[in-house]
Image (spheres, grey):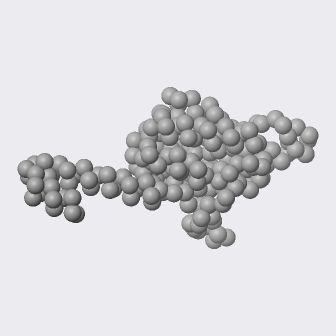
Amino acid sequence: MALTFLATTQLPLQQAIVLGAILSLLLYCAQAARQARFLALTRDPEGRWHLSDPPDRLPPGDVTVLYYAGTSFFAELPRIEQALPRADDAHGAVLILVVRGAPDVPSATMAKVIRRHARELDRQGGRLILAGVTPGLARILRMTGVDRDLGPGGIVPAAGAVFEPLDRALADARSWIAARSGEATDGTAGLRTPPDPPT
């Protein structure tokens, strides 16, 4: 407010308006970057979803669902990546990222963040699934080859009802974990066999 007041008294009006608009944009970007975060989604016995803080690390052999609440500005991606649960000792774990709420145009930088985490989970014997993927993000993932890192069924499009992509991703994740458990029983736990994509 002080800078805008000084600009309107010391600069021509058109320059003061441009300066005020730039300052407002910078403040908005800073606020949006601070507010961006991951929230854990948990379902109660009645089937209702609740928001909570994400875990520090992924529990092995279980499904973790995270909802991204933010605007995916370029500057906030490194901080958001650090907020993801740790993947060490995540054998048989599945992380589902609900990205339907990301409103801005996806970037190659976002695709790199997804690729790094997908590969880290794969090295630890886990898996990453994206639920509610918009057409723009799906196109970027195909162009950058991230869809191959995610594997079959790793991208669930944002189609149908609001929670339909999440339900499909959950069913896929549980099938994958069940298949891994069966392989461990047969002594073939080292072979990764993702389930077929949903039809």
Quarter of the image where the C terminus is located? top right
Judged left or right of residue 119, residue 163 is left
Q: Position of residue 89 (x, y in %)?
A: 78, 49
Residue occupying the point 58% across, 33% down: 146
Judged left or right of residue 173, residue 167 is left
Q: What residue occupies the far left of the structure in this picture? A: 12
Q: Position of residue 111 (x, y in %)?
A: 52, 37
57 vs 100, nearest the viewer: 57
13 vs 196, nearest the viewer: 13
Total marks in image: 0
Residue occupying the point 88% across, 37% down: 188
Say whether residue 115 is visible.
Answer: yes
Residue occupying the point 50% across, 46% down: 77
In this rendering, the answer to whether 64 lies above or below 91 is below
Q: Picture quarter containing residue 176?
A: top right
Say whether residue 163 is visible.
Answer: no
In this rendering, the answer to whether 174 lies above or below 197 is below
Quarter of the image where the N terminus is located? bottom left
Q: Position of residue 91 (x, y in %)?
A: 78, 47
Residue occupying the point 55% across, 36% down: 112
173 vs 102, nearest the viewer: 102
Q: Picture quarter containing residue 148?
A: top right
Judged left or right of residue 55, residue 179 is right
Q: Position of residue 172 (x, y in %)?
A: 67, 47
